[in-house]
Amino acid sequence: MRRTRILTAVLALAAGLLAGTPPALAAGPERASIAADTYTWKNARVDGGGFVPGIVFNRAEKNLAYARTDIGGAYRWQESTKTWTPLLDSVGWDNWGHTGVVSLASDTVDPNKVYAAVGTYTNSWDPGNGAVMRSSDRGASWQRTNLPFKLGGNMPGRGMGERLAIDPNRNSVLYLGAPSGKGLWRSTDSGVTWSQVTNFPNVGNYQQDPSDTSGYASDNQGIAWVTFDESTGTAGTATKTVYVGVADKDNAVYRSTDAGATWTRLAGQPTGYLAHKGVLDAKNGYLYLSYSDKGGPYDGGKGQLWRYATATGTWTNISPVAEAETYYGFSGLTVDRQKPGTVMATAYSSWWPDTQIFRSTDSGATWTKAWDYTSYPNRSNRYTMDVSSSPWLTWGANPSPPEQAPKLGWMTEALEIDPFNSNRMMYGTGATVYGTENLTNWDGGSQFTIKPMVQGLEETAVNDLASPPSGAPLLSALGDIGGFRHTDLTKVPPMMFTSPNFTTTTSLDFAEATPNTVVRVGNLDSGPHIAFSTDNGANWFAGTDPSGVSGGGTVAAAADGSRFVWSPQGTGVQYATGFGTSWAASGGIPAGAVVESDRVDPKTFYGFKSGKFYVSTDGGATFTASSATGLPSGDSVRFKALPGTKGDVWLAGGASDGAYGLWHSTDGGASFSKLSGVEQADTIGFGKAATGASYQTLYTSAKIGSVRGIFRSTDKGATWTRINDDTHQWGWTGGAITGDPRVYGRVYVATNGRGVIYGDSSDAGGGTDPGPGPDPTPTGACAVTYKVTNQWSGGFQADVQLANTGSSAWNGWSLGWAFADGQKVTQAWNAETAQSGTAVTAKNVGWNGTVAAGSSVGFGFTGSWSGTNPKPTAFKLGEQNCTLN
């Protein structure tokens, strides 16, 4: 699930983009106007989209909780809105690695204090060391202490923990478990300074794959967790008993009974496994441990659960199933602080048919499961799942039993019962945070309800963005979950791109003159690596791969959609007319080149590779190297052709040890001029021109006037305005950027772990599109096809096809029907919906109002239901009855 995020960072590092010290906010040249405009920044909602390896509840204050992500920062729970607030958006370009959070701790003595151990990779992929961030205002602002070693928020073993812990009796004392053989560290001044606990006897020895020469899988996973026994101390004095988990299968657990002065290996402990978690029930005197034979978060084939009696030293195997029956490891582990005999654990690496959650109410003596088989392959669930707020979590799947859609989860290493509320539980998966607020139904034999509890937590890695001149305002290419078509930026799209579902979409493009034609390419373990759409990305069909393709690469659509040029991984650049059923090799351009299309001439395409710019004027059949010189010599380059003007090309990229900046060509790449005021640039995009401007607005992630930021120019690059600020930086933003061609000032920014950020300007210069007119009242014959495409307990998804069977075109439409059994529309796409009682109305959005005679238009929605969920029996287009197919 996370390979793409690794590669994104590697590509950035390979280009040398991330070296150096944080930029000072000093005044630059006159041409760089710093923070001269006020922007409002939001996420284009996906809700989740990545791995959440840790959830931490404060045990002194009700409703105070935090979540950590492996590459997307940390979040605080907002109880009043049931949403998450991002806390590390202030992390800037030069410290991008600090968006990976390896551990998090919330202070029980002073709940205003929170700490985060940050750093993304322990190998060369991240040039910077780790740090401990500390906040005295719940993450609203931070101070940082740099560490003399690296931390690995996105490394193997990142679901173990928590590695960072605060002494619950003397909160100035903190411990941090380090990877890479760096041992155990301690602070005695509330995280300001740190020193190694030199007498701690074991730095760990477990490596996922010792033969990995990259240093990623071969790193020593080190110290995994620290747990205090709060009953062995009093307020203001250091807690005497501290337990530490080590990534060592033979020596996994150590204890100090003298506040860290000395340490001993716990006698009698199980061997042959890694202790992913150690959770203490001080009331009953039990330390619970979840074990796996691997470090996770993907691997793990065997596991056990154990209970250690702290008073007697007795070890008890409390595994809910026999070791021989496990094909997974255990990790997620929690106790109910209101009822400490209640324990829960997860089978985190059970990929098929689903994860499993176990619950005991007698300290592990007996267990029940979240689901059981009745008669294989049928299963009975103790829970119901409602994903109507994030319907894409079904993955558009309709699996055969015993699999279900949506799944209970995978990579379930974070599991926490609210310490103040036995009914609330949250757990993290590879894609979201799930939770329930009626958990104790489990014990009474009735079903509890699981829903996404993830709004506000946006964790996708963004590879490419497009904002067409008509249709949906935003199309995205994402790591791990493919990508989305946003018709409303404030709502979660109903489904990621499907048919096929790429694990990662690496590039996408639309035909400038016919934006309903869209192409995307990506990675897939088996199957095609290219897909096409003829309805602006609403529906897709797979293309055919040329021989040798192993990955998505980049792709470009001709301005009129008549042909495509594709530079996939595994083979050379290819071109095709039509929708890619027959590809031919392009001549004159090297394999691996980045390709783009001219936005006016359908036969002109461009490419770039290793400092050379290439041009094709015959639809991609042959390319010729440009004579342009002085361009970046490396391959960390992104370029785009300007819509509306043939041959107008902008190129951004480079590296700090060579050419680096922004270049412009007005002759189709024959020559380029470098913009002198742009010191570094990594992306380029275009948006609606300002009022009175003759040229489209430019956007870039760049360094201008000695300041790193997101910049806008309304005068063809003559002057620039920084439009973000120091609290909105989002780490690395070098993946993609685009303006909106319909809304002046709106910009979409790709991040590596914080999703798609979009900004709107307080400056109304240029205005926006006109608002909607009066409701349409079309006339003429019509036909409707209504299909329920997915249904789950309490929810469903439906598609509606509305056909114009009359003799004249519709210029706007409004379709009405009644739900007979209490169904309610919860979210719609490709239509605006309203419901009053049983009556539902769906009308066109701006781009799909015109429907020619003999043509049709489609839309869909999710809804809630009870009873039998019958289909509507009649539809009306205005006052016209439609035929029901």
Image (cartoon, rainbow, N blue to C red):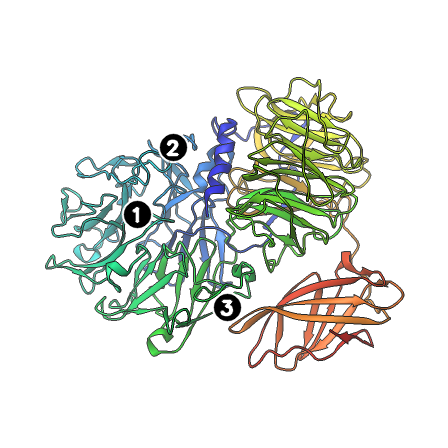
Q: In this view, does 501 lie to the left or right of 850?
A: left
The picture places residue 556, in percent across and down from the top left corner, at: 68, 38
Q: Is residue 641 left or right of residue 611?
A: right
Q: How far apart are marks 1 and 2 (CA)?
A: 20 Å
| Residue that carries the numbered disc 1 in the rendered image | 294
The answer to whether residue 761 shows anywhere in this view is no
Mark 3: few/some/many CA within 10 Å (<14, 14-19, 20+): some
Q: In which quarter of the image is residue 232?
A: bottom left
The picture places residue 206, in percent across and down from the top left corner, at: 27, 40
Tell me if residue 555 comes above or below residue 42 in the rendering.
Answer: above
Q: What residue type is labelled 2?
A: Asn
- Residues tagged 2 and 3 counted as in contact (Cβ below 8 A): no
**Nearest to viewer (mark 1 / mark 2):** 1
The picture places residue 156, in percent across and down from the top left corner, at: 36, 43
- Residues tagged 3 and 1 counted as in contact (Cβ below 8 A): no
SS label for mark 2 = loop
The answer to whether residue 299 shows anywhere in this view is yes
Q: How far apart are marks 3 and 1 (CA)?
A: 32 Å
SS label for mark 3 = loop
Q: Distance between the residues labelled 2 and 3?
A: 40 Å
Disc on the earlier residue, 2 or 3: 2
| Residue that carries the numbered disc 2 in the rendered image | 123
Q: Quadrant of residue 322?
A: bottom left
Q: What residue type is labelled 3?
A: Asp
Disc on the earlier residue, 3 or 1: 1
Q: Which amino acid does label 1 sit on?
A: Lys
| Residue that carries the numbered disc 3 in the rendered image | 386
